[in-house]
Amino acid sequence: MIKEVDKQNFKKIIKEKECVVVDFYANWCGPCKMLRPILEEIASQYPEISFVSIDVDKEDELSREYGIYSIPCLILFKNGLEEKRVVGLKSKDELKELLGDK
């Protein structure tokens, strides 16, 4: 399950959780809507990883802070630090690569 978070929750989650995938998206974004079911499926296969989403329209300050200029944008955080980033609609296999599965 992917949890919608705001700036306050986001900061707390990336500090407390070892591994977090953040989906920066917008409701009007077609590729974001296409990516969502793929992310939901992957999230169910990786219960040890926290999956969260941030609406760039509601959290524009956070989006600017992380340099989000194109969406969808997925960022993998490990121990509070950004480790990897992918932009655009990706396949299930490409997303698994982000998580370290090859």
Image (cartoon, rainbow, N blue to C red):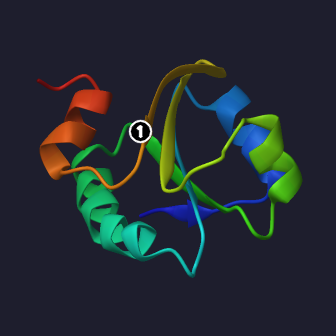
Task: Tell me which residue sits at (81%, 43%) in the image.
Answer: 64
Foreground pick, 38 / 31: 31
Task: Tell me which residue sits at (25%, 62%) in the image.
Answer: 38
Task: Tell me which residue sits at (82%, 37%) in the image.
Answer: 65
Side of 90 where 48 appears, left or right? right
The count of marks equals 1
In percent of width and height, residue 58 lies at: 80, 69
Foreground pick, 3 / 16: 3
In percent of width and height, residue 52 lies at: 55, 54
Q: Quadrant of residue 31?
A: bottom left
Amino acid under label 1? Ile
Residue 20 visible in the current orientation = no
* Secondary structure of residue under mark 1: loop
Q: Could you tell me which quadrant the N terminus lies in?
A: bottom left
In percent of width and height, residue 91 lies at: 19, 51
Residue 3 visible in the current orientation = yes
Q: Quadrant of residue 56?
A: bottom right
Side of 68 where 42 appears, left or right? left
User: Badge 1 local density, few (<14 within 10 Å), some, or many (20+)?
Assistant: some
Side of 63 where 18 appears, left or right? left
Q: Is residue 99 above or below residue 35?
A: above
In percent of width and height, residue 47 lies at: 33, 45
- The residue identified by callout 1 is 49
Furthest residue to the front?
A: 69
Side of 90 where 82 appears, left or right? right
Q: Could you tell me which quadrant the C terminus lies in?
A: top left
